[in-house]
Amino acid sequence: MKFFIDTADLTEISEAHAMGILDGVTTNPSLCAKVGVRDFEAHIAKICEIVDGDVSAEVVSTTYDDMVAEGRRLADIAPNVVVKIPLIKDGIKAIRTFTDEGIKTNCTLCFSPTQALVAAKAGATYISPFVGRLDDVSTDGMQLIEDIVTIYDNYGYETEVLVASIRHPMHVVESARIGAHVATMPLSVIEALIKHPLTDNGLAKFLADWDKLQASLK
Ligand code: G3P
């Protein structure tokens, strides 16, 4: 399973990268606003210098011609840029164009199996279903992941299921159990994957016992 970090914060990206387990980065306009990105293309270039893996950069255009022009500019920033496109009609058309041009795409804002099926037919590299936002409206986000993985497996679609809007470690556990290809998470969730109170307590006890042993040898 691939781990992506879901942020535009360069410090957080560097921190996750330093752990040696980071496979890519996803950004969106809200995440860019959160860290006050001024020059978007320069910012994406900086992220691509830190991380070797796929870096999703989202278009803000909403018509086919504009999305294609904007996406081509983004794809020119670095070879690992993935053009992120919203799941609307013109977006699907743009994904087909990028697929035909060999430009990688991440189809975002997916909330249903039918949307995911259409994105796969257009040749999207990634589909991003938002599990947390579905949970927020009393709909089972993980059920959507299960449905999409089953549908893609049934027909051998190569589109990778990138679980997005992850809010806690159980979203990651369930994604892995279902066989989703990628989980994109905030740094807080990546760190939470590692935490266990028995590990911390156990380590504290090991170190205390070791200190006692050293003191007894003096
Ligand atoms: O990758 C999509 C993600 O950034 C959305 O997360 O927490 O705003 O629903 P959230």
Image (cartoon, rainbow, N blue to C red):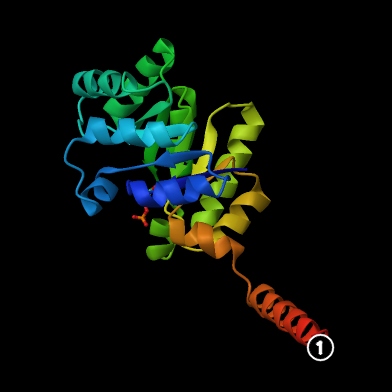
User: In the depicted view, which residue is nearer to us: 169 or 91?
Assistant: 169
Task: Using the image, determine if residue 162 lies above or below residue 165.
Answer: above
- Disc 1 residue: CB within 8 Å of ligand 1: no
Identify which residue is drawn at 43% across, 26% down.
Answer: 80
**Image quarter of the C terminus:** bottom right
Identify which residue is drawn at 76% across, 86% down.
Answer: 215
- Residue 174 left/right relative to 98: right
Going by the picture, which residue comes out furthest to the top?
Answer: 101
Q: How many marks?
A: 1
Q: Which residue is mark 1?
A: 216
Q: Residues within 10 Å of mark 1 (few under 14, many from 20)?
A: few
- Residue 47 left/right relative to 16: left
Q: Position of residue 203 (x, y in %)?
A: 69, 75
Task: Using the image, determine if residue 62 lies above or below residue 98.
Answer: below
Identify which residue is drawn at 65% across, 44% down.
Answer: 179
- Residue 90 left/right relative to 217: left
**Image quarter of the N terminus:** top right
Going by the picture, which residue comes out furthest to the left?
Answer: 38
Q: Position of residue 15 (x, y in %)?
A: 45, 51
Identify which residue is drawn at 43% across, 55% down.
Answer: 186
For badge 1, the amino acid type reads: Ser
User: In the depicted view, which residue is nearer to us: 150 or 53?
Assistant: 53
Q: Does residue 49 appear anywhere in the picture?
A: yes
- Residue 20 left/right relative to 49: right
Task: Using the image, determine if residue 173 lies above or below residue 96.
Answer: below
Which of the 4 image quadrants contains residue 26?
top left
Which secondary structure, mark 1? helix
Q: Does residue 140 appear anywhere in the picture?
A: no
